[in-house]
Image: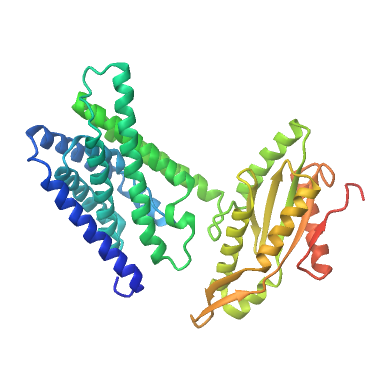
Amino acid sequence: MWRRPLPFIVVLIVAELVALAGFVVAVAGTGAPSAEDWLHLAILLAGATVHIQLTRRQEERRRNRMQSVLIDLIAVWVFPAVLVLPPALVITLIVAVRAQRWFVARRPAHNFVFSSVAHCFAAVLAGELYHALGPSGWDGLTLAGSVREVAFVVVAAVVYEAVQLLYVGGIIALAAPKPTVRRVFGSKADNVLEAITTGLGAITAVLLVTLPPMVLVMAVVTVVFNRLAELEQLQADATTDPKTGLRNMRGWSESAERALGRVRRADGTLSVLMIDLDHFKWVNDTYGHPAGDDVLTRVADVLREVTRPADIVGRFGGEEFLLLLPDTATDGAEHVAERIRATIAGLAIDTTDKRGSQVAITGRTASIGIAVYPDHATTLDGLTQAADAAVYEAKEGGRDQIRLSPPLGQ
């Protein structure tokens, strides 16, 4: 920890001290836990322990594959504590659960302590807000009353998730040499998974209050859910390029074929762009392969930034990328290609050279080929080949330029 940058160390220590002070205030403001509170804690801890012990190997595999924030699914057990237990027992539960996770995580102690403090801080803050809203008992609620209670639960869930994102994301941003939104806050799929897990936690809370023995059923549900999460991650890994986080050729082709099918049925148009980085071998030879990887990663970020959600971005291989633009004809494709070309040409990519010294790589260019359906080809393979041929024309013409494939049949 002490080898980290000074801003990281200062923020880490200050954040933990603020959280600890908040814990003291929250615990001091509540009375001693009741016997029912202790029973609820025991039930949640039993369910969490079953879940953790039965998914140890899965969780270890998931952690080893993750390149961003890991969603570890403990919200199923922590969030019900937020809604039902006093702050002291919420902290007790989190510490007990995280202590078991320690043997799976195998991370530096300061990272693990900080993330545990973040869990506690988010949970206590969300719990204090929830109880300040004045929730009613859940037995005998009318329809209108249940809607009101659900709204309170949703508010608590939003606070619980948002505080963790900001608290942990902020420190990750300080620690990461090249922070990206995905690396700091996780992917969209990661956050959807966390939201679903918190929703399961709300259901667990209802069971805990109304039918406590049924909470143990949630332990089985979470084990199954953990395995489904691992399968989903395996499927994502099979279609994702590990260096850039973009789709690999398998993932890109599958998505692109579906998009092309929709365009055919609608009698529409789409464009395929092939982006080839000029003289990329020179980067590897001059600065080393890690620097080349940093260039690929930064270009991938550029492609995400300049495209629409419906556009399909992938890595073709080596220094080549593919971009499919649905509902885009020649003029629109040329406009996007020029924006990509100009953006890449203006990049200053911070990286290290072969000796580990900090350098900034500038002046990189790209040659871009465009093929449009149905003008230049009517199949995905045909479009890809046409765009690739246009790239070679751009390179032969001097590089750092855009070329359009000739019409079909020419």
Residue found at x 65% / y 60%: 317
Most foreground residue, 163 or 37: 163
Question: With 236 as the anchor, is 82 left or right in this view?
Answer: left
**Where is residue 350 drawn, in percent x and y?**
54, 72
Q: Camera-side residue: 305 or 325?
A: 305
Percent of width and height locating residue 6: 33, 73
Q: Is residue 244 above or below residue 191?
A: below
- Of 295 and 121, nearer the camera is 121
Residue at left offset 70%, top offset 69%: 365
Q: Is residue 64 above or below residue 253?
A: below
Horizontal side of 57 relative to 317 (left or right) equals left
Which quadrant holds the N terminus? Answer: bottom left
Return the x and y of residue 268 as percentages of the image width and height.
77, 36
Outermost residue to the right? 410
Front position in the image: 128 or 109: 128
Q: Is residue 184 visible?
A: yes
| Picture quadrant of residue 195 | top left
Q: Quadrant of residue 258?
A: top right
86 over 116 or under it: above or below: above
